[in-house]
Image (cartoon, helix red, strand yellow):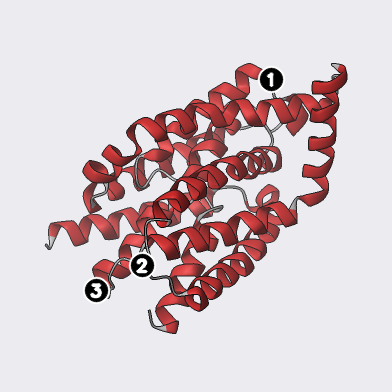
Amino acid sequence: MELLNLILLAAIQGLTEFLPVSSSAHLILPSILLGWKDQGLAFDVSVHLGSLAAVIIYFYSDLKHLTINWLHSLKDGESSPESRLAWCIILSTIPASLVGLALGSLIELHLRTILVIAITTIIFGLALGYADYKNVGSKDIYKFTWKSALFVGFAQVLALIPGTSRSGITITAALLLGFERTAAAKFSFFIAIPIIFLSGAYKGVQLSMELAVNWLELSLGALFSFAIAYVCIHLFINLVSKIGMMPFVIYRVILGIILLIIVANT
């Protein structure tokens, strides 16, 4: 893979994994517009690991406290806001993990088309805009309950449809429940960790069947993905309460229209 291709694909992964703009819509564009070949499973795993490292390191302090309190709740039955949030994160991960394991291959095979991605990019972008417009932002992240966690978790299942955006649909669900923008974004980042880990582990098992691996290429992909994702998380968390979701909504609608034009002309 050429260095420019590698940097661009890693940057796309790092940006779109956490911004509510749909990674599927962006990863399909280079192959359509530039004729690039699929980057391969090994590279896909490496850039996902880079994104995973970024979110873990950025939220290390939060994750440390959540883990310690969760372990205390297991050992001593102690309940705290942190332990309850940790259980909510775990609960939110279950629906998408089960459905993804059962239907992920079928969805990738039958729904990963430009038309589907264009439509879902627009529809779920508008849903994000509606949720942001109606949101009053009164609940902080520790107000999550098992019911709200499951609601966001089942919403995350929709992200298996290409073009939906995992972060976009989970933030939409949290906003509809009345959580403030920063809380919705942070919860989306937190539940991304187990999802990215499980996805990477599953693909890693598939990757173990491959014999030829370019370790330099994979390392560079992971490094670029990590750097872009880390900066993206920092900027998004610090700006989301000020700028809201509308810039991303407008961007998604324009991107979806561009994809529809491409479909109409092919």
Between marks 2 and 3, how big is the CA–CA gap?
A: 12 Å
Q: Quadrant of the C terminus?
A: bottom left
Q: Give SS at disc 1.
A: loop
Q: Amino acid at mark 2?
A: Gln
Between marks 3 and 1, how big is the CA–CA gap?
A: 46 Å
Q: Amino acid at mark 3?
A: Gly
- Residue that carries the numbered disc 2 in the rendered image: 39
Q: Is residue 175 above or below residue 77?
A: below
x, y (%) of residue 213? 43, 70
x, y (%) of residue 246? 52, 49
x, y (%) of residue 123? 36, 40
**Occupied quadrant, residue 152:** top right
User: Dot 1, how many residues are within 10 Å of its Cα: few (below 14), some (14-19), or many (20+)?
Assistant: some
218 and 171: which is toward the camera:
218
- Residue that carries the numbered disc 3 in the rendered image: 35
Q: Look at 32% across and 69% down and name the residue there.
A: 30
- Residue that carries the numbered disc 1 in the rendered image: 145
Q: Quadrant of the N terminus?
A: bottom left
51 and 34: which is toward the camera:
51
Q: Give SS at disc 2.
A: loop
Q: Earlier in the sequence, mark 3 or mark 1?
A: 3
82 and 165: which is toward the camera:
82
Q: Look at 27% across and 75% down and name the residue there.
A: 34
Dot in front, 2 or 1: 2
